[in-house]
Amino acid sequence: MTTAATHELAQVNISRLKAPLDSPQLKDFVDALDSVNADAEAADGYVWRLQSEGGDATDLRVFDDDWLIINMTVWRDSNALTAFMYQGDHREMLARRNEWFERPTEAMTTLWWVPTGHRPTIAEAEARLLHLRANGPTPYAFTLRTSFPPGTAEPVAGEVPEGLGCSV
């Protein structure tokens, strides 16, 4: 007997651009977006991705910073997300990320469980990422390396120390 899943896995990753999206330096990245997004949508376990009317999320602001771009998706589970991340065009994009994005000095990616059918907001993603930066992996915000099963996901006390704010 199988039961319907009560949770799905949300992920967000943000990146600081090295150049404007319309620059020659980012041409290969921008040209590959439609293909990578189509691959994601066709992947086993894919549920949803954040996108604007333009069909991607490159024009959506995160942390009130024009140089940051956001990718946020929902997946059946971490196995489905991982399978997508390390194959095909997406794998090639990962291998080239240092050409297009600044090297991060703090966490830029986090995962968290959402109730089935919930579609996270940018504000929710920002809060989860700040929580991870302040507290490390917890059931509220975690990483692929240190993950937690669906369940308790309350933020820990003192989730974002004063001054942490939006330093990305």
Image (spheres, grey):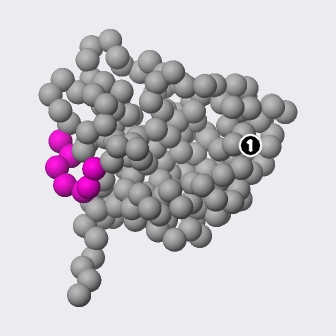
- Name the quadrant containing residue 1: bottom left
Does residue 27 appear anywhere in the picture?
yes
What is the span of residues highlighted in magenta in the rendered image?
148-154
Say if the magenta span includes residue 152.
yes
Query: Where is 148 relative to 102, above or below?
Result: below
Q: Main secondary structure of the magenta part?
A: loop
Q: Name the amino acid type tagged 1.
A: Phe
Does residue 121 appear anywhere in the picture?
no
What residue is rendered at 24% in x and 79% in y? 3
Give coordinates of residue 27: x percent, y percent: 81, 40
> Which residue reaches farthest front?
145
Q: Report the side of 70 relative to 37 (left or right).
A: left
Query: Where is 20 relative to 70, above or below?
Result: above
Say if the magenta span includes residue 143.
no
Q: Badge 1: how crowded within 10 Å, few (<14), some, or many (20+)?
A: some
What residue is rendered at 30% in x and 24% in y? 134
> Which residue reaches farthest top?
163
Query: Where is 95 relative to 51, above or below?
Result: above
What residue is rendered at 26% in x and 39% in y? 138
Q: Report the side of 16 relative to 105 (left or right).
A: right
Q: Which residue is mark 1?
A: 29
Give coordinates of residue 25: x percent, y percent: 81, 31
- Name the quadrant containing residue 18: top right
Give coordinates of residue 20: x percent, y percent: 73, 28
What residue is rendered at 30% in x and 55% in y? 114
Give coordinates of residue 4: x percent, y percent: 27, 76
